[in-house]
Image (cartoon, rainbow, N blue to C red):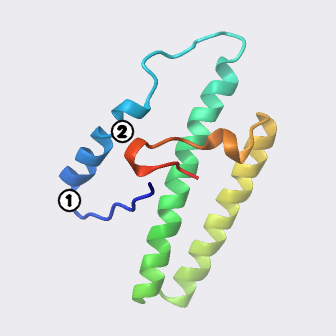
Amino acid sequence: MNRIIETNAPEEFVEEIGKLRGALPKRIDANPKNVEKGLAKLVLTLVELIRKLLEKQAMRRIDAGSLSDEDIERLGETLMKLENRMKELKDVFGLKDEDLNLNLGPLGDLM
């Protein structure tokens, strides 16, 4: 089940995030051999989540007409650079898009 959460109230956001606790593992495997890749996976997953949220917010602002053509161009270029850098980092750490997928519990999968 995929749900989109739109809110201007931080309390609602915190409440929804609280519902995700069951989706997180109770223990973390801190094996020295794979800790670097695991950390990279975690960080890149969070960056990907934030990137997708930024893209959705940008589209809302574009649709609402609250951005100038110059702002839209700059935002598009920035998001493209971030996406390209993410691809480079996934290659460096041997990660694929599926590796960055995160089960968000009742919200469904990240990707």
> The disc labelled 1 sits on which kind of residue?
Ala
Q: Where is residue 70 in the image (x, y as percent from the top left)?
A: 56, 85
Instruction: Kindly identify the amino acid type of the residue bearing the numbered disc 2.
Output: Leu
User: Dot 1: what SS?
Assistant: loop
What crowding class fits label 1: few (fewer than 14 Cα within 10 Å), some (14-19), or many (20 or more)? few
Local packing at callout 2 (Cα closer than 10 Å; few below 14, some 14-19, many 20+) is some
Q: Is residue 70 above or below residue 7?
A: below
Residue at 67% over, 9% down: 32
Residue at 20 percent across and 59 percent down: it is: 9
**Observer-nearest residue: 65 or 78?**
65
Identify the residue position indicated by label 1 in the image. 9
Q: First in sequence, mark 2 or 1: give its number.
A: 1
Position of residue 77 relative to residue 64, above or below, is above
In the image, is 81 to the left or to the right of 48?
right
Instruction: Provide the residue designation for mark 2.
Output: 20
Q: In this view, does 61 lie above or below 38?
A: below
Residue 62 visible (yes or no): yes
Relative image position of residue 27 (x, y in whole percent): 47, 15
Residue that sits furthest to the front in the current view: 1
Name the residue: 41% across, 50% down.
Answer: 107
